[in-house]
Amino acid sequence: MTMSLRTIIISVLLIIIFVQKDMLSAQGAAGGACTIMIRLKTSDLAISYDDRLIVQNLNISIPQGKVTALVGANGSGKSTILKTMARIMNPSHGNVLLDGKSIHKQSTKEVAKQLAILPQNPTAPDGLTVSELVSYGRFPYQKGFGSMSKEDKSVVQWSIEATGMGEFAERPVDQLSGGQRQRAWIAMALAQETDILFLDEPTTFLDMAHQLEVLHLLQKLNEKNNRTIVMVVHDLNHAARYAHHMIAIKSGVVRGEGTPIEVITPDIMRDVFNIEADIVPDPRTGVPLCLPFALAGLPTADKVLGGDAVDKGDKPSLTAAGA
């Protein structure tokens, strides 16, 4: 009996060890250690356009239940990576693994029940109402051309209300403001009832108020519904404020990964964005603020027209700058 009990204990311990291999240890916000589960990751991923290699040997992990921001200069490959992880593009090599299974070997409907994507600048047919758009999110759960079930309608209604679009439910999408339109598309993604939501530059072409409106909604979806959110973001300060995890990409290669404090550094800004920047704490949240003040190298205009790079010397005081 003793040996049997010992065998059981050893077996349990081995199971725990193997499970822990798929977990990521990270520092909590209060400085304590916490364990973050990883469900989605890439394995030696390579992505090509025709014969041109864009991404090679990419190995990244997306923390479950967190907001992850992909950042990088234009043409760095971040949107290409997002589309491949969301199964819109096929890799030329390697895998995107969800719960240990390659998403590119699963059926479209099965993947659509696990992850949703909001592409860059989506457009809806003229006259399509918000409720009609959101109902498309129930497609993975319908059989053939059947009508929506009572449960489908309930989920659509919840998605509309959760995104604050109740009063616009019967309004055509093309008659909405930019922020309202983005919320309508996010509602459609919510109607898919997936744990993971991908967004490709969700604040592009929006004014500052609408940008904050969309980012605040995503923050609430993460906090209240534990949605894992992966988004491409151009504004570094937005990424630092709203994301728990950041991945900085240059030419398809990860050059920095971790918390905003670990990624928003002068060295990474210089390497990834070719800028010199002061990094200061946000007075409201304490997250890093990036304040660019010069290009890291001689500007192209100065190479052609002559001149010196921007002075990187002493910083003026606020009084002197405003004088």
Image: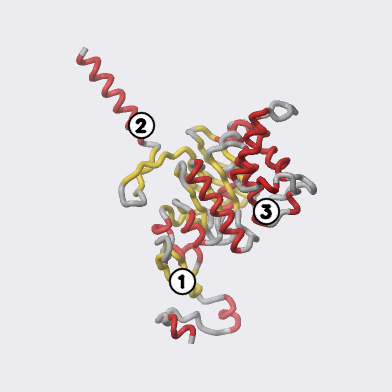
| Left or right: 313, with 167 as reference point | left
- Indicate the quadrant where residue 300 lies: bottom right
| Outermost residue to the left | 2
Badge 3 is on which residue? 121
What is the x, y in percent for residue 227? 51, 42
- Bin the neighbour count of mark 3 within 10 Å (Cα to Cα): few under 14, some 14-19, many 20 and up: few
Name which residue type carries label 1. Answer: Glu
Front-most of residues 303 and 88: 88
Q: Is residue 3 above or below residue 226?
A: above
**Element at label 3:** loop
Badge 1 is on which residue? 276
Q: Nearer the viewer, mark 1 or mark 3?
A: 3
For the question of whether residue 243 can be seen, the reply is yes
Front-most of residues 129 and 257: 129
Question: Which residue corresponds to the image point at 53% horizontal and 38% vertical from the top-left?
Answer: 195
Question: Which residue corresponds to the image point at 51% horizontal and 65% vertical from the top-left?
Answer: 273
Name which residue type carries label 2. Answer: Phe
Badge 2 is on which residue? 18
Front-most of residues 67 and 323: 323
| Left or right: 81, with 19 as reference point | right
Q: In this view, does 130 lie above or below 19?
A: below
Q: How far apart are marks 3 and 2 (CA)?
A: 42 Å
What is the x, y in percent for residue 163? 60, 47
